[in-house]
Amino acid sequence: MTTPAPRSCLVHGPSGCGKSTNAQAIGKALGLRDVLDNWTPGKPAPLLNTLVLSSESDPIWHFKGRAMTFDQAMQIARQQGTVV
């Protein structure tokens, strides 16, 4: 029996907030293996198993998956113990 890959997740926040620096810890906390950095709304994005990072101010309506702010993602990462 195989486990289906988790749906991708968009994490957005301003440039320089730490998305790229903390991408591995956030991805691990969310159960995602791959990272797509600097995604721009309107461009294709993987639907499965990818942490998608964006600095756009309102990218959510362009993304067909779960989405959260950088602060929300870091809170989950801290709760999961993947970042201090």
Image (tube, rainbow, N blue to C red):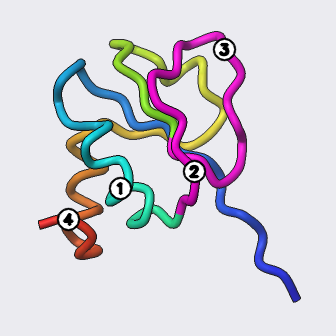
- At label 3, which amino acid type do we have? Lys
Q: Name the residue under label 2.
A: 34
- At label 4, which amino acid type do we have? Val
Chain-order first, disc 2 or disc 1: 1
- At label 1, which amino acid type do we have? Ile
Q: How crowded is mark 2: few (under 14 residues within 10 Å), some or many (20 or more)?
A: some
Left or right of residue 16: residue 3: right
Answer whether residue 46 is magenta in the image.
yes
Q: Is mark 4 on a helix, strand or loop?
A: loop
Mark toward the viewer: 2 or 3: 2
| Residues at circles 4 and 1 in contact by the CB criterion of under 8 Å | yes
- At label 2, which amino acid type do we have? Asp
Q: Quadrant of the C terminus?
A: bottom left
Q: Name the residue under label 1.
A: 26
Residue 75 location, x and y as percent?
21, 57
Q: Which residue is drawn at 32% across and 37% down?
A: 20
Q: Residue at x 28, y 26 (%)?
A: 13
